[in-house]
Amino acid sequence: MSTLYVDTINEKTSGNGVQIPGHVVQVVQSVKTNQSSSTSSSWSDTGLSASITPTSSSSKILVLVDVMFSHEPGYSGSNLRLLRDATTIYYGTGTGFAGLASNFGIPNGSDFVSSRTPANYLDSPASTSSVTYKVQFQSLQSAYIGINRTQRVNGTYDPAGASSITLMEIAQ
């Protein structure tokens, strides 16, 4: 039996590297620390997005989203959705992946509530071109919704939160 020892394996030509099914090929992350808000019933960009260029058209992209999402208490029609470029790829009926119920964990004197909202989605873009994933939000009742704004108590905002989107290319 022979043993092969190597320190580095380099591609001779681009796109012909060693890809082991199930292994992570590359990781991209974007962190949003500024705040954004809306009262619109139209879908609006949250400002949370990231782009990746898959090395193989057979690769899958694991999208991990963590959003600090807030809304006024008493309003439950707030939604988030995930898009690949202009196509919606992750959205539930009625309340999206972040349909926040009203009146949970409201501190005394608070005039809106916030929570961490995670989402995971395994996508098959079937492309080797750059792909952009982004999160959008909407308010179904014209109520305030926000990203990265924590609870407001008696007119004073707590320090802002942060949100992230992580893209992992998985070899197939």
Image (cartoon, rainbow, N blue to C red):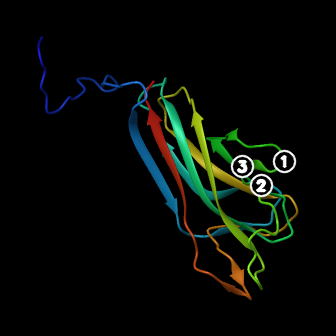
**Residue at x 31%, y 27% (from the top left corner):** 14
Residue that badge 2 annotates: 99
Query: What amino acid is at disc 1?
Result: Gly
Q: What's the distance in space between the residues labelled 2 and 3, CA to CA?
A: 6 Å
The residue carrying pointer 3 sits among few (fewer than 14), some (14 to 19) or many (20 or more) residues within 10 Å by Cα, namely: some
Disc 2 + disc 3, Cβ < 8 Å: yes
User: In the picture shown, does residue 112 fall above or below 16?
Assistant: below
Say what secondary structure mark 3 lies in: helix
Relative to the observer, which residue lies in front, 148 or 14?
A: 148
Residue that badge 1 annotates: 94
**Residue at x 46%, y 51% (from the top left corner):** 29
The residue carrying pointer 2 sits among few (fewer than 14), some (14 to 19) or many (20 or more) residues within 10 Å by Cα, namely: some
Looking at the rendering, which quadrant does residue 98 occupy?
bottom right
Question: Residue 145: horizontal and vertical position, in percent?
Answer: 75, 66
Q: Is residue 26 left or right of residue 57?
A: left
Query: What amino acid is at disc 2?
Result: Gly
Q: Is residue 104 left or right of residue 63?
A: right
The residue carrying pointer 1 sits among few (fewer than 14), some (14 to 19) or many (20 or more) residues within 10 Å by Cα, namely: few
Question: Residue 27: horizontal and vertical position, in percent?
Answer: 41, 44
Whether residue 151 can be seen here: yes
Looking at the rendering, which quadrant does residue 13 occupy?
top left
User: In the picture shown, does residue 147 fall above or below 97?
Assistant: below
Say what secondary structure mark 1 lies in: loop
Relative to the observer, which residue lies in front, 84 or 25?
A: 25
Q: What's the distance in space between the residues labelled 1 and 3, CA to CA?
A: 9 Å
Image disc number at residue 97: 3
Disc 1 + disc 3, Cβ < 8 Å: no
